Amino acid sequence: MLMVIQMKPLTTAAAIACLLTLIPAMPAQSTPARARIILQPSERFQFIQGFGVNYTGPYFRDDQKAMFDTLIKDLGASMFRVVPYLVYSNWEETNDNDDPNVMNWEYYNDRYSSPVFEATWNGLRFLNSRGIRPVIGLMGPVPDWMVDDHWTPPKHKVCQTESQQRPLKPAMYDEFAEMVVSMVMYARTKAGIDFEYFSPFNETDCYPPEGPRVDPEEAPKVLAAVARRLKKEGLGDIKLTPADQAVITNDYVGPILRDAELMKQVGAFTLHTYGENSVGPNVERVKNSRYAHVPVWLTEYGDLNDRDKTADNEWKNYSLASNRRALTALNQGASALFFFDAFDDYEECARRLCFYGLFRSADHVYAPKKRYYATRQLYHFVKPGSQRIAATTDVHGLTVSAFHDGADGSLVVVGVKEGGSNKVVVALPPESGAVASWDLYMTTRAVDCVKTGAFASLNGTVELDVPDEAVFTLVGRLQK
């Protein structure tokens, strides 16, 4: 807020002296002359398992294969999280036989050979042909006959506070396990899908319609029923990836960590965020447990303001903010990221055409959006098996992550710049080795993930010109 201060008139000489006094102080109040990024390759953190995207399996079509190849070969997606049955887990609307210990395969074979599932199997087989082992993840509510007769208020945060959704009934945990494991069995043994990871429910704190209501203290019991059934059916090699929670500050991880038998079947902990909270607290829960080796994945991120189709929203929210969320999650310990969504589609849970995708799909013509190229700045250059290294910056509005690829000795720095000085200095301490030159790639409002030059470093330091707003990548080779 500006304040009006009355002062006595100054003589000309006094006024000049006053101005000379003020001039040196002015730069301290302006934008810093340079933004500094300090790399510490010897300080190392998690290995990167890969980056990926989400999509709804039944929407797969043969005319999408070129788009999927672009996602794999150009974007760099090495992981896919696929929902097999629209966004519902209610294909068993009528109980198959009232006995959770015996699967009625006449019933299940009919369900899993329907057009909805067949489209999913075709898409998953295509991913297998490209060397991708997809994550199969269920979404949406369960059949009504599986839910409890009574409602109780939740003790944790939920998306729809006014909802009185009844929870999955404890007496039905084995029925639920039978239903979802029958689908896994069919996928593996009859549809011929090669996969390792399975998520039996989604966003159980965002009911309806994202998932069934399963409260944190009940989640281990439901998962234990699924794990037991997997082992019974000879599928003990399939790893569970819970809890795909919507409210990332909820503690689903802690109760699961306390079940030693269940943890034998857990392959990763999975979280979602579309806001400023990230994976850090849950990463710390895992690191401080007996299971510090279990990775944490961010299986949904991006932005939810999809109805605003302006170029400004595409840039500010889907290009800058989404990639800031990605880097923040990596800096807090995530080992894998999955952008939501691969392409625009009709979302059954929202009952409308949604525009979350990296690709627009108008009339089945698939074209990458600006957000695709901004995401490529990370996915294309940071390879699976790379290890995150320490990277710090001294200015607000600049988010950076850095990685070392032991396979080829490269260093990769990815940054999201949202204001500040256009001069960016990247420095390596002398004891870390040297990078002779850096290749710079940028996505801005004007360009789409293009190489803007190669810059030689001097005494471990390189100075770059980066626009006011940009997603940028530096690639160099570390020399000892």
Image: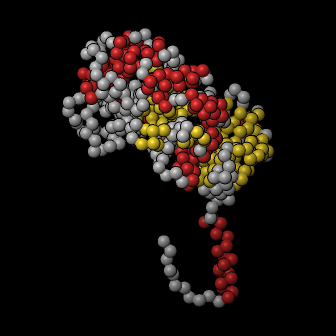
Q: Is residue 41 left or right of residue 320?
A: right
Considering the image in quadrants, where does the C terminus appear? top right
Q: Which residue is drawn at 55% across and 50% down?
A: 314
Q: Which residue is drawn at 76% across and 46% down?
A: 453
Front-most of 428 and 248?
A: 248
Question: Where residue 382 sits in the image (x, y, percent)?
Answer: 64, 34
Q: In this view, does 436 lie to the left or right of 89?
A: right
Question: Where residue 127 sits in the image (x, y, percent)?
Answer: 57, 24
Q: Which residue lies furthest to the front in this view?
A: 363
Question: Where residue 233 sits in the image (x, y, percent)?
Answer: 40, 11
Residue 294 seen in this snapshot: no
Q: In this view, does 255 lie to the left or right of 340?
A: left
Q: Residue at x 54, y 21 (%)?
A: 125
Front-most of 45 and 264?
A: 264
Q: In which quarter of the image is residue 236?
A: top left
Question: Where residue 256 sits in the image (x, y, percent)?
Answer: 38, 26
| 399 w.r.t. 57: above or below | below
Residue 164 seen in this snapshot: yes
| 344 w.r.t. 198: above or below | below
| 309 w.r.t. 233: above or below | below
Q: In this view, does 466 lie to the left or right of 234?
A: right
Q: In which quarter of the image is residue 63?
A: top right
